[in-house]
Image: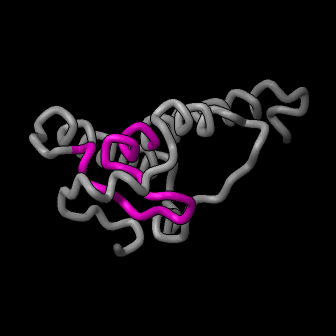
């Protein structure tokens, strides 16, 4: 299995998945532990402006939302090889959502800091 690549639907590969949906959501929402994304999904550049970053985020989010609304793919039997454990495509979609939520929590923490905004 290639890292980060969705493989053809194969129910046998599900046996290697260790994490439950609940485990993934709990882990993503746990701000007491810092984590680093695998290299293949880390951002590769910077955006010239905040507006450019927001536009890129919105475009990618819209693509994912369109896929979710329109797919007939067997999400539970397409498996992605991740560094800690394989995940199915449904779980990857859960992580996308939870990842945005995690960043929202980070922003709230920064804004709640008595030194915010630092000038």
Q: How is the image coloured?
A: one colour
Task: Say whether residue 13 is visible.
Answer: yes
Q: Is 5 in the magenta?
A: no
Asked whether 2 or 48 is in front, the reply is 2
Residue drawn at the location 79% of the way across and 24% of the way down: 112
Q: Would residue 101 be found to the left or right of residue 110 on screen?
A: left
The percent coordinates of residue 1 (x first, y second) are 34, 73
Instruction: State the residue at coordinates (76%, 34%).
Output: 110
Question: At which x and y percent is residue 39?
Answer: 54, 70
The quadrant where residue 13 appears: bottom left
Give left or right: position of 119 versus 89.
Answer: right
What residue is drawn where x is 51% and y is 58%?
85
- Magenta segment, which residues? 75-95
Question: Residue 3: x percent and y percent?
Answer: 41, 71
Q: Nearer the viewer, residue 107 or 84?
A: 84
Front residue of this view, candidates 28 and 84: 84
Could you say which is closer to the camera, residue 89 or residue 36?
89
- Vertical position of residue 83 compared to residue 93: above or below: below
Residue 76, by quadrant, is top left
Rendered view: 15 above or below 62: below
**Number of numbered callouts drawn:** 0
- Picture coordinates of residue 60 (x, y %)? 32, 48
Any magenta on residue 92?
Answer: yes
């Amino acid at each position: 299995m290639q890292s980060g690549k969705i493989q053809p639907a194969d129910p046998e590969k599900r046996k290697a998945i260790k994490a439950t949906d609940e485990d993934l959501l709990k882990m993503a929402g746990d701000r007491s532990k810092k984590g680093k994304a695998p290299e293949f999904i880390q951002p590769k550049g910077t955006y010239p402006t905040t507006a450019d970053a927001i536009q890129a985020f919105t475009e990618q989010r819209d693509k994912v939302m369109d896929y979710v609304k329109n797919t007939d793919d067997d999400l539970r039997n397409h498996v992605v090889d991740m560094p800690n454990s394989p995940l199915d495509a449904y779980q990857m979609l859960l992580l996308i959502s939870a990842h945005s939520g995690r960043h929202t929590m980070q922003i709230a923490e920064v804004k709640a800091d008595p030194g915010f905004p630092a000038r």
